Image (cartoon, helix red, strand yellow):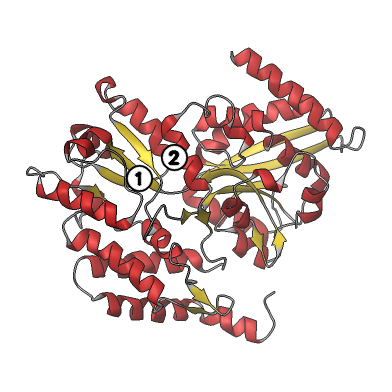
Amino acid sequence: MQNDLGLRLLSAGVLGVCLTGCGRAESGVVIELWAAGREGEVVSELTRGFEATHPGIRVEVQTLPWSSAHEKLLTAVVGENTPDVAQLGNTWIPEFATIGALAPLDRLVETSSRVDENDYFPGIWATNRFQERLYGVPWYVDTRLLFYRTDLLKSAGFERAPSSWGQWQSMLLALRDRAKPGQVALVLPLNEPESLIAFALQQGDPLLLDGGRSGNFASEGFERALEFYVSLFRRGFSPTQGTAQIANLWDEFGRGNFTFFVSGPWQLGELRRRLPKTLEGRWSTAPLPGESGPGVSLALGSSLVVFEASPHKQAAWQLIEYLALPEVQQRFYELTGDLPPRRESWQGPPLAADREADAFRRQLEQVEPAPQVPEWERIASEMAHVAERAARGLDSVEAAQHELDVKTNRILEKRRWLLERGALP
């Protein structure tokens, strides 16, 4: 089967060469690709197919540790030593675009027969647009949704996962009231703000105002989201210790010590590897519930970008086009477990028949990007800290909203100063 896949990738790559212009490919060049973590470790297996179908172009891969990838990329920009192509977390794109490090890709996409915007999940594609220009092409996607034990939920009287906050609260209440010592209904880590951000994005009120100049956390929408989030802890559904009191998330989930947790797609592989065979069919996934129905989640993942300083932009773009092929994305999923950003890539094996992964496909149709300002990750960190105090009962929701606006406006002070002087686009 793997040989068949290799032949399909080779055929797709040959076709890709002709569709992007036979005879127009750069030759005799070396493309430098920087990728992080597991993606960086396995991407060479994919680039070999690219090299086989693009004679004269060679790809050198440098693998960066995730913990220092952001710093190393910024250092490369400052030192004028950037790669041609890099994997960039999609929340980093506004920062690198603001400093002029990235090449716009709009015209390349418009003329491409391989990268079709309409085939990508819209919310994920939107993370690559900044100031009305496109700076990246999604490589793999990430979002947050529910993982749950179907058998435990059924024993509490519920046949299916919740689709609204009210349904979820009813389930959590029933699970809490029948819990044995050491059991909880939900595990929701307080040091991870993604769930709260998703609940806030469901409300429709922007999290930042006036082009990202100030916070909007005093809004009614964010108040509803924060109140709901805080209630999950104050009502005893989730412990405020989060994962700190859990020796091993997968083992405890397998033992039935909690029914729900919120996490990302990497957990699919972890649960399948770590849970005993006796639990097959006794756990599943579902999109995040919303206030009155299925809810929006956060658009996350990594994209491929071309650096402005690259002397080989055409060859770099051809590499991105190749890595965007559905056959290549399916192979990438097999190697990493990273979910593909294109709908077509979900239509073939191994994803088409994957029941647990299908919930991610449905959720990815309803995702939205975080505010696209370079300072967002600092703001998100403050959000986690402020929300934790409220969840522990140390601050009221109203006080938490005020503190978050104060801290956000302080973080955005330099941005406001630069915008007022026309120093930012």
Crowd class of label 2 (few under 14; some 14 to 19; many from 20; radius 10 Å): some
Is disc 1 placed on a helix, strand or loop? Answer: strand
Q: Is residue 11 above or below residue 374?
A: above
Crowd class of label 1 (few under 14; some 14 to 19; many from 20; radius 10 Å): some
- Where residue 104 sits, quadrant-wise, is bottom right
- Residue at the image position 57 percent from the left and 78 percent from the top: 415
* Quadrant housing the N terminus: top right
Residue 90 visible (yes or no): yes
Is residue 97 found left or right of 152 in the rendered image? right
For disc 2, the marked residue is 359
- Residue at the image position 42 percent from the left and 55 percent from the top: 295
For disc 1, the marked residue is 146
- Where residue 60 sits, quadrant-wise, is top right
* Quadrant housing the C terminus: bottom right
User: Residue 339 placed where, x, y %?
Assistant: 52, 38
Return the disc, 2 or 1, that comes first in the chain's sequence. Answer: 1
* Residue kind at label 1, given as amino acid type: Leu
- Where residue 283 sits, quadrant-wise, is top left
Is disc 2 placed on a helix, strand or loop? Answer: helix
Q: Are marks 2 and 1 in contact (CB under 8 Å)?
A: yes
Residue furthest right as drawn: 23
User: Spatial distance from mark 2 to mark 1, Cα to Cα?
Assistant: 9 Å
User: Residue 18 placed where, x, y %?
Assistant: 86, 31
User: Residue 57 placed where, x, y %?
Assistant: 80, 33
Q: Is residue 418 above or below residue 337?
A: below
